[in-house]
Image (spheres, helix red, strand yellow):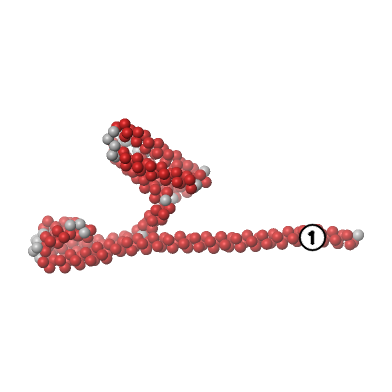
C-alpha cells in the first residue's frame, strides 16, 4: 500500500484530479443552467470521494506517521471541510471553502512545497520586520496627526484615520491625492511624505523580501547538506560492503584450500 500511494503515477493522477476539481468549482460559479449545475455538483461529489479514498489509503499506508506530517494534516482538513453537510446552517458557509482543495496542488508538486517551506522558515524573521514596520507606522502616524490634523482632517483627523492614510501612502494607493490635500496648505509637507515612502516602501518592505529569500536559501542549503550526508553515508556503506566481500572471498579461498591440503597430507601419510 505504501508503494502504491508513493508511486509517481499515483501522485500524478491525484494532481490531475485536484486541477480538474478546481476547474469544476470555477465553472460552477459561472453556470446559470440548473441542469448543468446539477451535473457539475455530481462531478464534484465524485472527485471529493476520490480524495476521501486517497486519504484513507495514505492513512492505512503510513499509519501514525500520517498525522505527524503537517501537509497530510492540511489535506485532511481541506477535504474534511468539504464533507460538512450543506443543511447545517451554521456551517454552510464552510462549503464555499471547497476551493481550498485546489491548494493541495502545493503538496503534490515538490517545487511548490519547497517554496512554501521556505516561506514558513522565514516567518520568525518576518515577525521581526513586521514589528519594525508597525513601530515606524505608529511613530509616523503620531507625527502626521500632530502636523496635519487641522489641514486635512479627512486624512489625519485622528490616530486611526492617520494610520489608514499612511497605509495607503505605503502601498502607493492614491498617495498623490493625500499629499496634494496637505501640500495645498503646507508646501513643505512633501519632505514628510518623501521620507516616509523612502523608509517604509523602499527599506522596510524590501526587508520582507530579503528575509523570505534568506529563508529559502537556508532551506536549500540544508537540502544540499542532507544530500551530501546521504552521499557520504552511501559511500561508506559501499566501502563496507566491498570490505565484507573481500573478506568473504578470502574465507572461501581458505575454505577451498583446506580440504585439498588435508587430502594431500593424508595421501602422503598413506
Q: In this view, does 19 lie to the left or right of 158?
A: right
Where is residue 72? Give x, y as percent: 42, 47
The single residue placed furthest to the right in the displayed view is 270
Residue shown at the point (58%, 62%) measured from the top left: 236
Task: Report which quarter residue 199 is drawn in.
Answer: bottom left
Task: Report which quarter residue 88 is drawn in.
Answer: top left
Is there any visible trace of residue 139 in the rendered image? no
Residue shown at the point (37%, 36%) measured from the top left: 43
Residue shown at the point (46%, 62%) measured from the top left: 224
Where is residue 7? Give x, y as percent: 50, 47
Q: Which residue position holds label 1?
A: 258
Where is residue 155? Give x, y as percent: 14, 57
Q: Is 210 in front, or is 91? A: 210
Find numbered disc 1 in the image and state the secondary structure of the residue it sits on: helix
Q: Quadrant of the C terminus?
A: bottom right
Where is residue 208? Give x, y as percent: 31, 61
Amino acid at each position: 500500500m505504501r508503494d502504491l500511494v508513493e508511486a509517481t503515477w499515483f501522485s500524478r493522477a491525484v494532481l490531475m484530479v485536484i486541477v480538474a476539481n478546481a476547474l469544476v468549482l470555477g465553472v460552477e460559479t459561472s453556470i446559470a443552467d440548473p441542469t448543468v449545475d446539477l451535473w457539475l455538483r455530481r462531478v464534484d461529489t465524485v472527485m471529493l470521494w476520490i480524495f476521501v479514498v486517497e486519504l484513507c489509503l495514505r492513512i492505512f499506508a503510513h499509519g501514525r506517521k500520517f498525522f505527524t506530517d503537517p501537509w497530510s494534516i492540511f489535506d485532511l482538513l481541506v477535504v474534511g471541510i468539504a464533507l460538512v453537510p450543506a443543511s447545517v446552517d451554521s456551517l454552510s458557509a464552510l462549503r464555499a471553502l471547497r476551493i481550498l482543495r485546489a491548494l493541495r496542488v502545493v503538496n503534490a508538486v515538490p517545487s511548490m512545497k519547497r517554496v512554501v517551506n521556505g516561506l514558513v522558515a522565514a516567518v520568525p524573521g518576518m515577525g521581526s520586520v513586521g514589528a519594525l514596520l508597525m513601530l515606524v507606522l505608529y511613530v509616523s502616524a503620531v507625527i502626521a496627526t500632530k502636523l496635519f490634523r487641522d489641514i486635512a482632517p479627512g486624512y489625519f483627523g485622528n490616530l486611526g484615520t492617520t494610520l489608514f492614510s499612511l497605509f495607503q501612502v505605503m502601498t502607493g494607493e492614491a498617495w498623490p491625492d493625500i499629499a496634494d490635500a496637505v501640500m495645498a496648505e503646507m508646501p513643505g509637507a512633501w519632505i514628510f511624505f518623501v521620507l516616509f515612502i523612502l523608509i517604509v516602501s523602499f527599506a522596510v518592505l524590501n526587508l520582507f523580501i530579503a528575509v523570505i529569500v534568506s529563508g529559502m536559501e537556508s532551506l536549500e542549503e540544508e537540502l544540499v547538506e542532507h544530500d551530501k550526508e546521504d552521499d557520504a553515508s552511501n559511500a561508506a556503506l559501499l566501502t563496507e560492503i566491498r570490505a565484507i566481500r573481500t573478506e568473504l572471498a578470502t574465507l572461501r579461498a581458505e575454505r577451498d584450500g583446506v580440504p585439498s591440503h588435508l587430502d594431500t597430507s593424508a595421501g602422503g601419510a598413506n
